[in-house]
Image: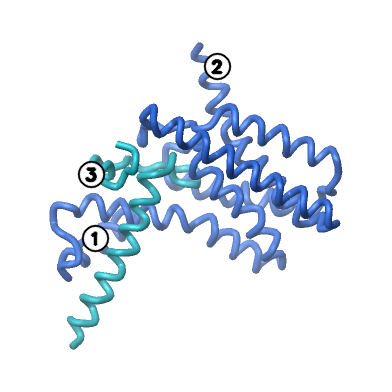
Chain colours: A blue, B cyan
Amino acid sequence: MIEKCADVIAGWLIECSAVEEVNRELYSYAVYSAFLTLSPLLLAIVFGLCMGCMKQSILIVTPFVIIRKFSGGYHAKHLGVCLFCSSLLLFLCIVLSFHLEGGWQLALAAAAAAVSLICFSPIDNENRVLSQKERVRYKKITAVLVVIYLLLDAAFFWFQLQTYAVCISIGIMLSAGLQLPCIFRGLAKK
Amino acid sequence: MKSKIAKSVAKGTASVLNAVLRADANSTSCCIFYQPKAPKDLEKFRRTK
């Protein structure tokens, strides 16, 4: 369905002479990718509106989206599974953010997740294999992003904005947690 | 007039999609749990060759 829509949009761009026919596949992929990139934010907005916690849901999803773009991690084989899992996981994270309390335990868990992200990133996928140069570059970018979010987390914690600190921590832990299946699979292969 | 508007909207859309392609070519993967197969031409948008 989404693939067909992407193809129709690419066809329309060709019709309007904005894109050349040879690039149809590329722009069809771009439309698809734009949808996939925006979907976590759209999900966060929908859940935020439904559950009356817009700030929390956006604060959870933002570090996750930005870090995961460079750290990589687990990917499902089918889009349907992906959308179902994303929705479920985001919903669970929002619920978790209501029940978790900011404190040293959570700060330590977030720090452990950050160390794991820095050590194991980037994790690539068979559909998007990375070169050695890209691996080095994305590892550095992930490390910088993780440190920035940890500092932001510490600042929220320091200024007693516990709810926001919890959300950022969950976002970092979610990115690290979704690398675990790939890390374990890699260890099992060895 | 109508086709002129359509053409400029299409050009704007193409520019946005170029930005999406650049972001995609210079990152590990899509940010959710599904990664579509990247076309070969995506390499044109990579900073590291």
The residue mark sitting in front, 2 or 3, is 3
Give the structural element (helix, strand or loop) at label 2: helix
Q: Which residue is mark 2?
A: A187
Q: Nearer the viewer, mark 3 or mark 1?
A: 3
Are the residues at dot 3 and dot 1 in contact (C-beta closer than 8 Å)? Answer: no
Q: Chain of mark 1?
A: A
| Residue A190 image point, x, y percent | 51, 11
First in residue order: circle 2 vs circle 1: 1
| Three-letter code, disc 3 | Asp
What amino acid is at disc 1? Answer: Ala
Q: Quadrant of residue A131?
A: top left
Residue A94 locus on image (x, y percent): 70, 54
Residue at 85% of width from left, 56% of height from top?
A160
Asked if the residues shown at circle 2 and circle 1 are in contact, with their CB atoms under 8 angstroms apart, the answer is no
Name the mark on residue A10.
1
Is residue A127 rendered to the left or right of residue A13?
Answer: right
Distance of label 3 from label 1 (alpha carbons): 15 Å
In the rendered image, the quadrant that contains the N terminus of chain A is bottom left
Tags 2 and 3 on a common chain: no
Front residue of A161/A43: it is A161
The quarter holding residue B37 reads top left
Tell me the chain of label 2.
A
Residue drawn 53% across the image and 32% down it = A121
Give the side of residue A63 with respect to residue A74, left or right: right
Residue for badge 3? B41
Residue A106 versus residue A20 in the image, above or below: above
Chain of the residue that carries numbered disc 3 in the rendered image: B
Residue drawn at 62 percent across, 42 percent down: A146
- Is the C-beta separation of discs 2 and 3 under 8 Å? no
